[in-house]
Image (tube, rainbow, N blue to C red):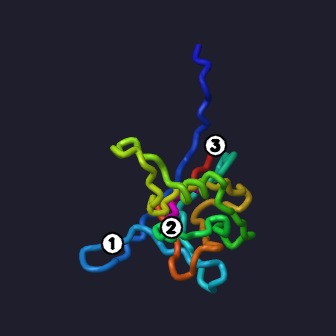
Amino acid sequence: GFDGPVIDEAVEFEVPDSLVSAGPNQVDVGWQVPLNTRPEKRIVTIRGVDVTGATSARLAFTMQYLQNNYGNANFSTYALDYRLNGGPSHRYPLSAAERALLESGVVLLGDGAGSENPVIWGALGQVLTVPLSELRAGDNTLEIATVGVPDNIPATLANIDLIVGK
């Protein structure tokens, strides 16, 4: 018999791209994320969520921290504040691995010089475990803001999925 890992069943609920005009022949797929000190927050809707039999929930998304492009960011102060459906707010500081990736870049195997690429354009794929108790059947709202990110260079959010384990 097969004695490898058992992969739990999961269902994903995707937030559609923003598709906002960014100029002639240009369309944005993500959203700017304001600082948590600003009155406005970024709110997106996750439609048609089914929580029947749910055992776990995670949010997966891409954040682009643009300050990385200039090489002088203090990533130790960066965090996300988020909440679901108007519930309690949660703070997620960047992990040590995320900070290291933004600070040092990656070695590109295809780079003939084998040098590091410290400017990875600040893009991170992030996954956050969220409390099941804060989800509801049907449409859910995700409110998100940044902490410690320079106000004049806001982060960008895209590719949002809610992954519900069953």
Mark toward the start of the polypeptide (3 vs 2):
2
Q: Residue 28's image quarter?
A: bottom left
The CA distance from mark 3 to mark 1 is 36 Å
Quick check: can you spot residue 43? yes
Q: Residue 162's image quarter?
A: bottom right
**Which residue is label 1 attached to?**
27
**Which residue is label 3 attached to?**
166
Front-most of 91 and 162? 91
- Which marked residue is nearer to the observer: mark 3 or mark 2? 2
Instruction: Tell me the crowding category of disc 3: few under 14, some 14 to 19, or many 20 or more residues within 10 angstroms, Cα based.
Output: some
Mark toward the start of the polypeptide (3 vs 1):
1
Residue type at the position of mark 1: Val
Instruction: Tell me the crowding category of disc 1: few under 14, some 14 to 19, or many 20 or more residues within 10 angstroms, Cα based.
Output: few
Residue 97 placement (x, y as % from top left):
62, 51
Magenta stretch: helix, strand or loop mostly: strand
**Which residue is label 2 attached to?**
71
> Is 108 placed above or below 90 here?
above
Q: Secondary structure at mark 3?
A: loop
- Which marked residue is nearer to the observer: mark 2 or mark 1? 2
Residue 20 placement (x, y as % from top left):
38, 75
- Which residue is farthest bottom? 39
Quick check: can you spot residue 161? no
Residue type at the position of mark 3: Lys
Answer left or right for 143 relative to 70: right
In percent of the image, x 72 and y 66: which residue is there? Answer: 90
In percent of the image, x 29 and y 73: which residue is there? Answer: 26
Q: Is residue 67 magenta?
A: no
> Which residues lie in the magenta part?
59-64
Front-most of 20 and 78? 78
